[in-house]
Image (cartoon, grey):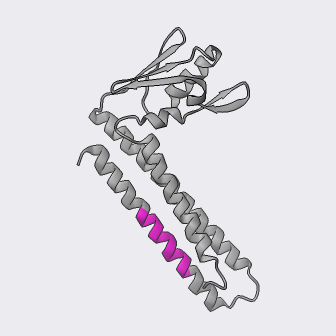
Amino acid sequence: MGQVLDVAKLTMQLDNVLEKLKNNFIKNVSLRTAAGAIEELTVTFDGSQYLLQELVQISRTPKLVTLNASAFPQVIPNIIEILSKNQMNLNPQQDGTVIYIPIPKVTKEYRENLSKSAKSFFIKTRDDIKDIRTNQIKKLKNLEKLPQDTFFRVQGYVEILTNQYISKAEKILETKQKELMGD
């Protein structure tokens, strides 16, 4: 296998996809909006992209996050738009150069919406894994002088490996959905 396929590179690509899924779950799909998730939002300002934490001063209490944008008041409309359109179910309120973000209560509907978001992140991850599999198989087909029986064995190995990673992603999703729904 190692002569035909770079197994280490393949597993690294698949591991990266799973890590991305875990990070998306941590940042975007948690019952209490992670403070880090708000800080990591990207705001476009003067044609450049900035992390929110670079433009505003952030303070938080258990039920409220306060953003002080007095250093860059012209970026406030962009910040409000980003906060309103993300998947965190936030409702920012502006008072001068200060933006207040009440952290939403954890309702059953909110939990179900988070569960749907988790499912969409899983589907994206599953599709990414399938894309990696497809690319690997295309590379194998393009190899000259590869015996057909070797091709089918390696293709089967790639199928099994990617299916294992899809199963891992499903388990991560199931665990996250149980956590979200309070099961």
Q: Which residues are magenta?
A: 156-168
Does 162 lie within the magenta span? yes
Which residue lies at the image location 48% right of the left edge and 47% below the top edge?
Answer: 24
Quarter that holds the N terminus: bottom right
Does 2 lie within the magenta span? no
Q: Nearer the viewer, residue 138 or 20?
A: 20
Q: Can the viewer see residue 53 in this picture?
A: yes
Which residue lies at the image location 33% right of the left edge and 55% below the top edge?
Answer: 175
Residue 4 pos. (x, y %): 66, 83
User: Is the magenta region chiefly helix, strand or loop?
Assistant: helix
Residue 42 sits above or below residue 19 on the image? above
The mark tally for this picture is: 0
Q: Residue furthest top?
A: 96
Q: Residue furthest right?
A: 144
Residue 48 pos. (x, y %): 71, 31
**Left or right: 135, with 85 as reference point:** right
Residue 122 sits above or below residue 80 on the image? below
Q: Can the viewer see residue 87 in this picture?
A: no
